[in-house]
Image (cartoon, rainbow, N blue to C red):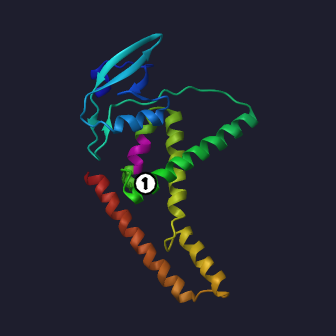
């Protein structure tokens, strides 16, 4: 990987990329994405020693951003009941905001990403499972948050579409015609099913 070629080792801390401070994992990913196929200097803390290494992120085949083939280190901490609840709520909120930002960026065209069908999801979850129970649980939590947000999109056959119908009924002061609601939901379901098939075929072929 580009990280191995640059001389990075486990437990190294990348402090800066081309002068940009990377004190969090999100900041590191954002900085690396900026330099596909470009040689950049990075500041690395290895214990008490500060190193300057030359790194060339490779271009992601599914986009135009750079990747180097590393992942964050994980540590296991034990909390009491209340502590676990606080950490769980905070972690869920952070994951929700990150996923919302990603989906909004994809809609605006400022973020790269793509939908995955069942084959892609199975492949992703399987890959994370091989990296340990912690990564598996994180992947499942992220998947649940993503499905929750997608389900809230105001589109027929989704809960978001149902909320739109309820809002229309509140404005009209009476229920919508049952036939209209059934036809709209049926069309929405067929469109979603078609998208799911296309995305799944792309996952298999790609």
Above or below: residue 102 compared with residue 73:
below
Say whether residue 69 is left or right of residue 88. left
Tell me where residue 158 appears, x and y as whole percent. 52, 69
Please report the residue visible at 53 percent of the width from the left and 89 percent of the height from the top: 179
Number of numbered labels in the structure image: 1
Tell me where residue 41 appears, x and y as whole percent. 32, 24
Q: Quadrant of residue 65?
A: top left
| Camera-side residue of 86 and 136 | 86
Please report the residue visible at 29 percent of the width from the left and 47 percent of the height from the top: 63
Res 1 visible: no
Image quadrant holding the N terminus, namely top left
Tell me where residue 124 appears, x and y as whole percent. 40, 44
Label 1: which secondary element: helix
Please report the residue visible at 72 percent of the width from the left and 34 percent of the height from the top: 83
Above or below: residue 49 compared with residue 169:
above
Magenta highlight on residue 8: no
- Farthest front residue in view: 19
Tell me where residue 55 appears, x and y as whole percent. 29, 25
Say whether residue 66 is left or right of residue 186. left
Prevalent SS, magenta region:
helix
Q: Quadrant of residue 42?
A: top left
Magenta residues?
A: 121-126
Label 1 CA crowd tier, 10 Å (few <14, some 14–19, many 20+): some
Question: Which residue is labeled 1 in the image?
Answer: 105
Above or below: residue 31 compared with residue 47:
below
Say whether residue 174 is left or right of residue 205. right
| Camera-side residue of 93 and 143 | 93
Please report the residue visible at 44 percent of the width from the left and 44 percent of the height from the top: 125
Res 148 visible: yes
């Amino acid at each position: 990987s580009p990280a191995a070629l640059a001389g990075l080792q486990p437990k190294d801390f990348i402090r800066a990329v081309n002068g940009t401070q990377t004190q969090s994992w999100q900041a590191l990913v954002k900085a690396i994405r900026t330099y596909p196929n470009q040689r950049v200097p990075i500041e690395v803390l290895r214990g008490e020693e500060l190193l300057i290494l030359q790194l060339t992120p490779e271009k992601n085949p599914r986009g135009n951003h750079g990747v180097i083939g590393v992942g964050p280190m994980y540590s296991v901490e034990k909390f009491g009941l209340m502590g676990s609840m606080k950490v769980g709520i905070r972690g869920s909120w952070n994951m929700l905001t990150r996923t919302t930002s990603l989906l909004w960026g994809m809609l605006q065209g400022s973020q790269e990403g793509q939908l995955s069908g069942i084959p892609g999801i199975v492949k992703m979850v399987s890959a994370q499972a091989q990296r340990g129970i912690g990564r598996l649980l994180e992947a499942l939590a992220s998947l649940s948050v993503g499905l929750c947000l997608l389900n809230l999109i105001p589109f027929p056959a989704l809960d978001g579409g149902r909320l739109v119908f309820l809002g229309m009924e509140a404005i009209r002061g009476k229920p919508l015609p049952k036939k209209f609601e059934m036809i709209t939901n049926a069309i929405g379901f067929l469109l979603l099913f078609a998208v799911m098939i296309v995305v799944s075929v792309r996952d298999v072929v790609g």
